[in-house]
Amino acid sequence: MAYTKGSGFFAASQTPISPGMGGSGLHWRCSITLVGNILKTHGAMGKDQYRESAHYSTGQSDNYFDWRDAQNDTARKPAAKFIERFPDIVKKGQGIDWQYAGW
């Protein structure tokens, strides 16, 4: 995952996604979490969806992560907001995880 920081970018591959479908089957879900919160037996399934995770569903449309101020954002703006609004995930997620990002 790449985030903007100031005018540049930094990578945080210790923040894998955990994808899924909503219960209705109509919406795609994506949780961004820490590598330690992903099951070792299933590389895309989270252990605890409430621990250090940010959640988005296509049912939220352009209200990313339930943000009400993202409807007109360009691609870089939500990344900057993610850094600001999920500082613990960003800080703990810095580093290289070759098993996840190296394929």
Image (tube, grey):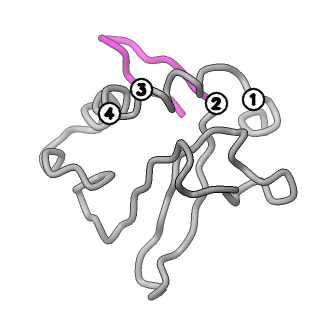
Q: Which mark is residue 86?
A: none
Outermost residue, top side:
7
Residue holding disc 1: 97
Under circle 2, the secondary element is loop
Horizontal side, residue 10 vs residue 63: left or right: right
- The structure residue drawn at horizontal position 58% and vertical position 25%, both measured from the top left corner, is 92
Determine the CA span between mark 4 and mark 1: 23 Å
Q: Position of residue 21 (x, y in %)?
A: 52, 75
Residue holding disc 2: 13
Q: Position of residue 8 (x, y in %)?
A: 38, 12
Contact (CB < 8 A) between labels 1 and 2? yes
Q: Which is closer to the viewer, label 2 or label 4?
A: 4
Instruction: Relative to 83, say whether 7 is above or below.
Output: above
Contact (CB < 8 A) between labels 4 and 3? yes
Q: Give whichever of discs 1 and 3 has the lower sequence position.
A: 3
- Residue type, mark 2 in image: Ser
- Residue type, mark 4 in image: Arg
Q: Position of residue 60 (x, y in %)?
A: 28, 65
Residue holding disc 4: 85
Contact (CB < 8 A) between labels 2 and 4? no
Contact (CB < 8 A) between labels 2 and 3? no
Horizontal side, residue 35 vs residue 103: left or right: left
Determine the CA span between mark 1 and mark 2: 6 Å
Specify start and end residues of the magenta stretch as a single range: 1-13
- Tell me the quarter of the picture where residue 26 sits: bottom left
Count residues near mark 4 (Cα–Cα under 10 Å), then give few for <14, some for 14-19, many for 20+.
some
Q: Which is closer to the viewer, label 4 or label 1?
A: 4
- Residue type, mark 1 in image: Asp
Q: Give whichever of discs 2 and 3 has the lower sequence position.
A: 2
Contact (CB < 8 A) between labels 1 and 3? no
